[in-house]
Amino acid sequence: MHVPQIHSVRTVCTVPLIDSIHGQKFNIEPQGGGDENGFARGAWDWSMLWKRVPLGDREKNLRKTITEPYRSPAMAGGLFAIERDFFFELGLYDPGLQIWGGENFEISYKIWQCGGQLLFVPCSRVGHIYRLQGWQGNPPPAHVGSSPTLKNYVRVVEVWWDDYKDYFYASRPETLTLAYGDISELKRFR
Protein backbone atom coordinates (compact mmCIF):
# COMPACT_ATOMS: atom_id res chain seq x y z
CA MET A 1 0.00 0.00 0.00
CA HIS A 2 1.37 3.39 -0.93
CA VAL A 3 1.01 5.63 2.10
CA PRO A 4 0.21 9.21 1.09
CA GLN A 5 1.73 12.03 3.06
CA ILE A 6 0.30 15.45 3.76
CA HIS A 7 2.87 17.26 1.63
CA SER A 8 1.94 15.19 -1.45
CA VAL A 9 -1.77 14.51 -0.82
CA ARG A 10 -3.30 17.52 0.86
CA THR A 11 -6.42 15.68 2.06
CA VAL A 12 -4.51 13.29 4.31
CA CYS A 13 -4.86 13.79 8.05
CA THR A 14 -2.38 12.02 10.32
CA VAL A 15 -2.81 11.10 13.97
CA PRO A 16 -0.22 9.94 16.53
CA LEU A 17 -0.70 7.05 18.92
CA ILE A 18 -1.58 8.48 22.33
CA ASP A 19 0.20 6.92 25.28
CA SER A 20 -1.00 7.36 28.84
CA ILE A 21 0.91 9.39 31.44
CA HIS A 22 -0.13 8.61 35.00
CA GLY A 23 -1.47 11.76 36.68
CA GLN A 24 0.44 11.23 39.93
CA LYS A 25 3.48 9.10 39.08
CA PHE A 26 4.07 10.60 35.60
CA ASN A 27 5.18 7.27 34.17
CA ILE A 28 4.28 6.52 30.55
CA GLU A 29 2.40 3.43 29.45
CA PRO A 30 1.61 2.57 25.84
CA GLN A 31 -2.01 3.03 24.87
CA GLY A 32 -4.18 0.15 26.01
CA GLY A 33 -5.96 -2.35 23.83
CA GLY A 34 -5.21 -2.96 20.22
CA ASP A 35 -3.65 -5.89 18.44
CA GLU A 36 -0.48 -7.76 19.42
CA ASN A 37 1.50 -4.56 18.61
CA GLY A 38 -0.92 -2.27 20.45
CA PHE A 39 -2.30 -0.84 17.20
CA ALA A 40 -6.00 -0.04 17.04
CA ARG A 41 -8.42 2.04 15.06
CA GLY A 42 -10.56 4.70 16.62
CA ALA A 43 -14.26 3.86 16.63
CA TRP A 44 -17.50 4.55 18.51
CA ASP A 45 -20.63 2.80 19.61
CA TRP A 46 -24.25 3.92 19.12
CA SER A 47 -24.09 6.00 22.30
CA MET A 48 -20.99 7.87 21.01
CA LEU A 49 -18.58 6.26 23.44
CA TRP A 50 -15.02 6.21 22.11
CA LYS A 51 -13.67 2.74 21.35
CA ARG A 52 -10.36 1.29 20.25
CA VAL A 53 -10.73 -1.64 17.86
CA PRO A 54 -7.69 -3.84 17.10
CA LEU A 55 -6.48 -3.82 13.50
CA GLY A 56 -7.96 -6.65 11.50
CA ASP A 57 -6.05 -8.89 9.09
CA ARG A 58 -7.31 -6.96 6.06
CA GLU A 59 -5.70 -3.71 7.24
CA LYS A 60 -2.56 -5.49 8.44
CA ASN A 61 -2.11 -7.10 5.03
CA LEU A 62 -2.21 -3.69 3.31
CA ARG A 63 0.86 -2.57 5.25
CA LYS A 64 4.41 -3.43 4.19
CA THR A 65 6.07 -2.56 7.51
CA ILE A 66 4.97 -2.39 11.14
CA THR A 67 5.64 1.35 11.24
CA GLU A 68 3.54 2.12 8.17
CA PRO A 69 0.47 4.31 8.86
CA TYR A 70 -2.95 2.68 8.80
CA ARG A 71 -6.48 3.88 8.16
CA SER A 72 -8.94 4.65 10.92
CA PRO A 73 -12.56 5.84 10.83
CA ALA A 74 -12.09 8.15 13.83
CA MET A 75 -9.49 9.90 15.93
CA ALA A 76 -9.36 10.91 19.56
CA GLY A 77 -9.73 14.65 18.93
CA GLY A 78 -7.30 17.52 18.95
CA LEU A 79 -4.04 15.67 18.24
CA PHE A 80 -3.64 15.55 14.49
CA ALA A 81 -1.82 17.05 11.53
CA ILE A 82 -3.78 18.37 8.57
CA GLU A 83 -3.02 20.68 5.68
CA ARG A 84 -4.20 24.14 6.77
CA ASP A 85 -6.25 25.02 3.68
CA PHE A 86 -7.98 21.60 3.70
CA PHE A 87 -8.89 22.11 7.38
CA PHE A 88 -10.45 25.48 6.47
CA GLU A 89 -12.28 23.90 3.52
CA LEU A 90 -13.78 21.40 5.98
CA GLY A 91 -15.09 24.33 8.01
CA LEU A 92 -12.76 23.70 10.97
CA TYR A 93 -14.65 22.39 13.99
CA ASP A 94 -18.38 23.05 14.34
CA PRO A 95 -18.40 26.44 16.13
CA GLY A 96 -21.51 25.35 18.04
CA LEU A 97 -19.68 22.61 19.94
CA GLN A 98 -19.04 23.58 23.56
CA ILE A 99 -16.05 22.80 25.81
CA TRP A 100 -15.29 19.23 24.68
CA GLY A 101 -16.95 16.06 23.49
CA GLY A 102 -17.94 14.98 20.00
CA GLU A 103 -15.38 17.15 18.18
CA ASN A 104 -13.28 14.06 17.47
CA PHE A 105 -16.18 12.35 15.70
CA GLU A 106 -17.30 15.49 13.89
CA ILE A 107 -13.88 16.19 12.36
CA SER A 108 -13.40 12.50 11.54
CA TYR A 109 -16.73 12.34 9.67
CA LYS A 110 -15.87 15.53 7.80
CA ILE A 111 -12.49 14.15 6.71
CA TRP A 112 -13.90 10.86 5.41
CA GLN A 113 -17.10 12.23 3.88
CA CYS A 114 -15.41 15.20 2.22
CA GLY A 115 -12.70 13.34 0.33
CA GLY A 116 -9.98 12.98 2.95
CA GLN A 117 -8.10 10.13 4.57
CA LEU A 118 -7.44 9.62 8.27
CA LEU A 119 -4.25 7.72 9.08
CA PHE A 120 -2.76 6.67 12.41
CA VAL A 121 1.05 6.90 12.39
CA PRO A 122 2.53 4.24 14.75
CA CYS A 123 5.99 5.82 15.00
CA SER A 124 4.46 9.15 16.05
CA ARG A 125 3.60 9.08 19.74
CA VAL A 126 2.21 11.66 22.14
CA GLY A 127 1.87 11.35 25.91
CA HIS A 128 -1.41 12.43 27.52
CA ILE A 129 -2.23 12.84 31.21
CA TYR A 130 -5.73 11.45 31.61
CA ARG A 131 -8.14 12.49 34.32
CA LEU A 132 -7.51 10.83 37.65
CA GLN A 133 -10.03 8.36 39.02
CA GLY A 134 -12.67 10.15 41.05
CA TRP A 135 -12.28 13.44 39.16
CA GLN A 136 -15.73 14.97 38.89
CA GLY A 137 -14.75 17.56 36.34
CA ASN A 138 -15.03 21.29 36.30
CA PRO A 139 -18.60 22.52 36.09
CA PRO A 140 -19.40 24.16 32.76
CA PRO A 141 -19.45 27.99 32.77
CA ALA A 142 -22.90 29.47 33.41
CA HIS A 143 -23.30 30.55 29.76
CA VAL A 144 -22.91 26.93 28.56
CA GLY A 145 -25.64 25.31 30.64
CA SER A 146 -25.79 21.62 31.46
CA SER A 147 -24.65 18.56 29.53
CA PRO A 148 -22.37 20.24 26.97
CA THR A 149 -20.93 16.90 25.85
CA LEU A 150 -24.35 15.36 25.24
CA LYS A 151 -25.50 18.48 23.37
CA ASN A 152 -22.38 18.21 21.23
CA TYR A 153 -23.15 14.57 20.46
CA VAL A 154 -26.68 15.52 19.40
CA ARG A 155 -25.32 18.19 17.04
CA VAL A 156 -22.94 15.67 15.48
CA VAL A 157 -25.51 12.90 14.99
CA GLU A 158 -28.11 15.34 13.65
CA VAL A 159 -25.70 16.54 10.97
CA TRP A 160 -23.78 13.38 10.06
CA TRP A 161 -25.75 10.24 10.97
CA ASP A 162 -28.90 10.50 8.83
CA ASP A 163 -31.40 7.81 9.94
CA TYR A 164 -28.74 6.10 12.08
CA LYS A 165 -29.32 8.84 14.63
CA ASP A 166 -32.28 6.77 15.84
CA TYR A 167 -29.80 4.27 17.29
CA PHE A 168 -28.10 7.07 19.22
CA TYR A 169 -31.39 8.31 20.64
CA ALA A 170 -32.41 4.75 21.59
CA SER A 171 -29.16 4.36 23.55
CA ARG A 172 -29.26 7.90 25.00
CA PRO A 173 -32.97 8.74 25.49
CA GLU A 174 -32.03 11.58 27.87
CA THR A 175 -30.82 13.54 24.82
CA LEU A 176 -34.18 13.60 23.04
CA THR A 177 -35.16 16.94 24.57
CA LEU A 178 -31.76 18.67 24.57
CA ALA A 179 -31.66 21.95 22.68
CA TYR A 180 -28.63 21.82 20.39
CA GLY A 181 -28.82 25.07 18.45
CA ASP A 182 -28.94 25.90 14.77
CA ILE A 183 -27.26 23.32 12.52
CA SER A 184 -28.67 24.49 9.18
CA GLU A 185 -25.28 25.79 7.91
CA LEU A 186 -23.60 22.52 8.85
CA LYS A 187 -26.25 20.50 7.02
CA ARG A 188 -25.85 22.72 3.95
CA PHE A 189 -22.09 22.20 4.07
CA ARG A 190 -22.51 18.45 4.27
Image (cartoon, rainbow, N blue to C red):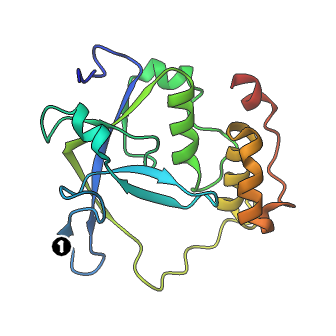
Q: Quadrant of the C terminus?
A: top right
**Figure check: 161 above or below 133:** above
The one nearer the camera, 130 or 55, is 55
Q: Residue at x 23, y 24 (%)?
A: 1
Residue furthest bottom in the image: 134
Residue furthest left in the image: 65
Left-right relation of 61 to 189 = left
Q: Residue at x 84, y 60 (%)?
A: 176
Tally the numbered discs: 1
Q: Residue at x 58, y 37 (%)?
A: 93
Residue furthest right in the image: 177
Left-right relation of 77 to 61 = right
The one nearer the camera, 168 or 88, is 168
- Return the x and y of residue 174 as percentages of the image width and height: 79, 68
The residue that disc 1 covers is 27
Crowd tier of the residue under label 1, counting other residues whose Cα lies within 10 Å: few below 14, some 14–19, many 20 or above: few
Q: Residue at x 24, y 40 (%)?
A: 60
Question: Looking at the picture, which amino acid does disc 1 mark?
Answer: Asn
- Return the x and y of residue 85 as percentages of the image width and height: 46, 18
Q: Dot 1: what SS?
A: loop
**Figure check: 56 above or below 128:** above
- Return the x and y of residue 181 as percentages of the image width and height: 82, 46
Left-right relation of 121 to 93 = left
The one nearer the camera, 44 or 16, is 44
Q: Quadrant of residue 188?
A: top right
The one nearer the camera, 172 or 185, is 172
**Figure check: 5 above or below 123:** above
Q: Quadrant of residue 28?
A: bottom left
